[in-house]
Amino acid sequence: MSTRVELPALLTPGDAVMLRNSLLAALATSGRIEVDASAVQHLSVQGVQVLLSFVASATATAHPWVLKAPSEDLVAQLESYGLFPQLMTWPVEV
Amino acid sequence: MSELDRLRRTFFDECEELLASLQDSVTALASPDTGGQHAAAVAAAFRAAHSIKGGAGAFGSGILVEVAHLTETVLDAIRAGRMTPSGPLVETLLRAGDALADCVSADRDGVPPPENPPVLAELRRLLGTEASASPTPPLEALPDFPVIRADTAPAPPAPPAAPPPRVWTIDFAPNAKALAAGHQPLLVLRALKALGPLQTVCDSSHIPPLDALELTESYLRWTLSLTTDIAPEVVAEPFAFVAPLCPPQITANDGSRIGFDPLGVGSLLTTDSPAPVQEVDPTPLPEPVSPETDPPLDPVRPWAGPQQAAASIRVDVERIDRLVNMVGELVITQAMLAQQAQGLAEDRFPMLFQGLEDLASHTRELQESVMAIRAQPVKSAFARLPRLVRETAQALGKRARLTLIGEETEVDKSVVEGLSDPLMHLIRNAIDHGIETPEERRAAGKPEDGTITVLAEHRSGRIVIQVSDDGAGINLAAIKRKAIEQGLLPKGADPSDDELYDLMFHPGFSTAELISNISGRGVGMDVVRANVNALGGRILVRSYKGRGTAFALTLPLTLAVMDGMLLQAGEETYVLPIANILESLQPAADAIHHLVGRGPVLSVRGQYTPMVDLARMFGHRPDPCDPTRALVVLCEAEDGGKVALVVDSLIGQQQVVIKSLERNYGHCEGISAATILGDGRVALILDVAGLRLLAARRHRREGDDPHG
């Protein structure tokens, strides 16, 4: 059984709080976590930190997860943040 | 809409304000510096140009950056006393503002900006950098800040070679304070990317696990490598606002270093190695240079960082509109509840009535607060007028100056937006057809410079925008002749001045055949009136032969809600704006008189006011009512004209939500809008000035009807 977490279109600092809670709840489950990134248009730095922190947690606990259908905006903005190398290490399903 | 689009839209909105500020400030430089206001104007203009440049850099608008940069540099020279703001220099700066506006418009509309605006050459000539600038340099080739030397000896000519690009290494670690203040590193990174090839490395090694993550903390750090030949000042610009909170470390491969004053507001302190400056020959400067007052070359260059934490926020208009709509619905609901409660005994339901009273009070307060959010100075509608006057006058070989009065008068945003086109049209017409040529003016004993005055003020709960000129005035005889020719007036008609002015707004009425001083005065005036009517306003015209013409646009302060008095006329309920009501009375028979061709008039304290039987006027009953048995409401229109409305009764005062008739149905003379009453019925809102005109016309057409 997988848990799906949808990233909002605008991952604002306010949304980062809710995303953190959703991802924490997902990490508390045992199944695979699907992070749906298809709608993302904007990534605040707070949102980026939550994503990176989630990845760090999932990696540390070997929790299975996947980034689903990352949007063009998400990829472009991670690149602008200088995080393209990190993105390349994440499990992605287009 | 993507976040980037939102940011772009915000940038364009800001540009509008900044361009207006730039234009105002530069215009102020043309006036004598009696109270030291030039220094403040130059500082304000500099800030505006600098902010435009910063934003444009972030969005990669190369030509916009360059024009803003050169403008800013000229202003910097004025500020430092190296140039004196005389007439030609002010003209150049105004043209620079125009070019910036063109570039912004082009960027906003998604069309290519002007490739090489002529003002660029003017600005370069002023700065003596003409030789080094290519016709259309890319953003990366933006010239460095030129330094005008302090010594009085003639400087060698500017070296034509572009400085070699430097590689800037930037260590940027935003802290929690920066994030709390709303700074987003992405904007900085994008702005830097617009300056040249940028290598971005993000150190995310300090990110904790999710359960330990503090969302207010900042864990990321960037090491950036920017290759560019742009001046250090420009490289530092993206950090202007964040630097006071977390100054980046910026060093170049040639040892240059950019530092920020940690105690100040982003002051750029030093560049250890001199930036590749262009030394310029001061001789080409057309403006007087005061070398003896030149300050010594200061290694601390001024930096226009953020002045103060902003005490305002920028909110999407759609959100406010939603709020306005909801307040409108709330007003209707409140009216409905009040109406429902009318049948109840107040002593049996005291809490209910107290609650309704509180609801009415809070609704009103909420409505006023929301309207205050939407209110903005009409200044923004005036922003383009100086340019329009200048260009139109130049094109027509006339001389005209513009005087703006009451720019800070506040009005609903939608009214401000809707004003722009009618204002521009009226001003163009005023110069084209109102203001005489310098020769004609001289011959008439007038100053060669015509004056266009645009005035804004609140009057009787409305805003009045008046465009007046001191030109030749409108030739009423010519209008009458033309109207008869076109069959708009019968031969032998004796229309009033107001009726003749009204003809100017008839579609297709005015043509070039009209004689000189009014020719074309009506071209497109029907469109002007349609626009003004759509805003719930009207146009009043006054003209004096040989002395000038004034068009007064009277508009509601808000298009959403107003205080109205509900009137009963026949079976219908009408709403009369409270602001128009002077008094209500039941007249005695001897107070009513009849004037031949003007219908009945009411004598109140020695003044005679035309009477209008509302129910008869709108066809609700064929016979006139006896005013001595009815009620008369004495009203005053925005132009000061009075009318006595004969109604059956006053129902009560109420806030009403204005619904446009223009948009939903069409223009109705004597009616300004409609509203929805508490019981769900639609009621029409009366337009007092329109009623007066309508009644006058009807009396003349129907003859002398003793009952109105």
Image (cartoon, coloured by chain):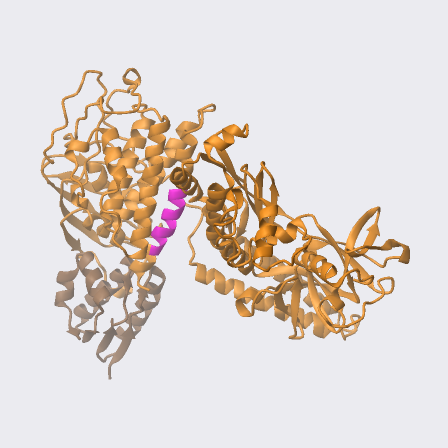
Chain colours: A brown, B orange
Q: Quadrant of the N terminus of chain B?
A: bottom left
* B333 with respect to A24 (left or right): right
Quadrant of the rendering where the C terminus of chain B is positioned: bottom right
Q: In terms of depth relative to the viewer, which is nearer, B240 or B392?
A: B392
Q: Which quadrant of the view contains residue B345?
A: bottom right
Work out whether residue B305 can be spotted. Answer: no
Q: Residue B480 in the image: x percent, y percent? A: 61, 51
The front one of B145 and A4 is B145
Magenta residue span:
B9-21
Q: Main secondary structure of the magenta part?
A: helix
Which residue sits at x=50%, y=47%? B519
The number of discs equals: 0
Residue B462 part of the magenta segment: no
Seen at 80% across and 50% down, the residue is: B608
Q: Nearer the viewer, residue B405 or B221?
A: B405
Answer whether residue B177 is visible to the viewer in this image: yes
Q: Position of residue B604 (x, y in %)?
A: 83, 50
